[in-house]
């Protein structure tokens, strides 16, 4: 009987320790005195950098509203924030939580009074949001059929000059060709603001975390983060240019301008694809 009681107590202690370890493993926001880090950033002539807001956990993409509200998505978190500078001193005075309980709501974009938010598997919209920051409306689901894989599944979104919403669908791996299972993988897609006419704009894009358009030519420029486990010096991240739809930028067969992937030798090679326009340093994860 004493041995049985001892085993029960030991089991309870193990369960408690396991529970504590799980709680300790949860991601926590890293808070630091940002002003000290700003001193390390060199800006171009005529530019300066200063703190706008602190304590916005896991902040990622930002979008500016028509009335100056700064909307902030978050990665490895579940919230979307709104920051308001009420006295025009270039520092946020109010912070609102627009939504919580979301699935890695990294991407945010603003158009015609509405805030668009990209989770891993869907895009939602908050209408007339700047008039309702303290009491946000229920979101409208625009599209909820995107792949649900977390690896490279968080999204950066933006409206293009064609008024379409551009959405990257990252490769759910380090290096693989999952496009044979689902052609949306490793691509940049676009759709109308209401979610209709979803289509692939560019293929062979492993994981883009930022893009913009040339205001004169409307050409799309985008970054792409290179694969891992090819050594300390390869491959570089990329800056690419897509002047038209339908181009393929090489992943997983080709990296940069001329680096064929050794895991796909004998199939396609760099000569079969659009090469990177500019090589960035490796693993810098550049944003636009």
Image (cartoon, grey):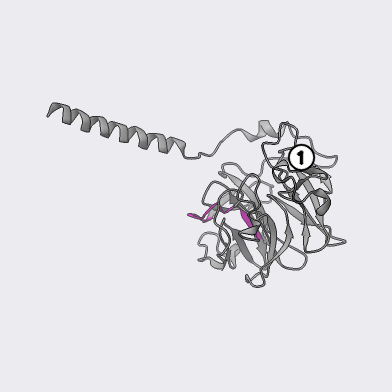
Percent x, y of residue 3: 16, 27
* Magenta region includes residue 105: yes
Front-most of 266 and 261? Answer: 266
Looking at the rendering, which quadrant does residue 133 occupy?
A: bottom right
Furthest toward the front, the residue is 266
Above or below, 11 against 80 in this view is: above
Above or below, 55 against 6 in this view is: below
Percent x, y of residue 152: 61, 49
| Residue drawn 78% across the image and 64% down it | 245
Classed neighbour count for the residue bearing mark 1: other residues with Cα under 10 Å, few (<14), some (14–19), many (≥20): many
Kind of element beneath mark 1: loop
Above or below, 102 against 22 in this view is: below
Q: Would residue 168 appear left or right of 55 to someone viewing this image? A: right
State the residue position of label 1.
236
Front-most of 177 and 42? Answer: 177
The quarter in which the N terminus is drawn is top left
Q: Which residues are magenta?
A: 98-109
| Residue drawn 60% across the image and 50% down it | 172
* Magenta region includes residue 89: no
Percent x, y of residue 268: 76, 51
Furthest toward the right, the residue is 216
Percent x, y of residue 185: 64, 56
């Amino acid at each position: 009987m004493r041995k049985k009681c001892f085993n029960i107590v030991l089991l309870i202690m193990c369960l408690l320790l396991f529970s504590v370890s799980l709680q300790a493993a949860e991601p926590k926001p890293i808070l630091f005195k940002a002003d000290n880090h700003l001193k390390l950033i060199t800006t171009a002539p005529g530019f300066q950098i200063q703190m706008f807001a602190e304590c916005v956990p896991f902040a990622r993409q930002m979008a500016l509203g028509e009335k100056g509200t700064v909307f902030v998505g978050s990665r490895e978190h579940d919230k979307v924030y709104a920051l308001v500078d009420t006295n025009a001193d270039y520092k946020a005075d109010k912070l609102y939580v627009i939504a919580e309980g979301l699935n890695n709501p990294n991407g945010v974009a603003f158009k015609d009074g509405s805030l668009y938010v990209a989770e891993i598997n869907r895009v939602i919209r908050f209408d007339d949001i700047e008039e309702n920051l303290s009491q946000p409306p229920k979101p409208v689901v625009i599209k909820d059929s995107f792949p649900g894989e977390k690896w490279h599944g968080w999204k950066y979104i933006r409206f293009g000059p064609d008024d379409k919403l551009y959405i990257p669908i990252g490769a759910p791996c380090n290096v693989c060709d999952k496009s044979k299972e689902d052609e949306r993988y490793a691509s940049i897609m676009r759709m109308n603001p209401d979610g209709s006419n979803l289509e692939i704009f560019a293929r062979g894009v492993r994981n883009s975390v930022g893009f913009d358009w040339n205001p004169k030519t409307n050409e799309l420029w985008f970054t792409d983060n290179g694969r891992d486990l090819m050594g300390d010096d390869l491959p570089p991240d990329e800056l690419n240019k897509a002047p038209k739809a339908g181009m393929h930028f090489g992943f997983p067969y080709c990296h940069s301008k001329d680096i064929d992937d050794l895991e796909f030798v004998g199939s396609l090679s760099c000569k079969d694809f659009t090469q990177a326009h500019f090589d960035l340093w490796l693993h810098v994860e550049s944003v636009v």
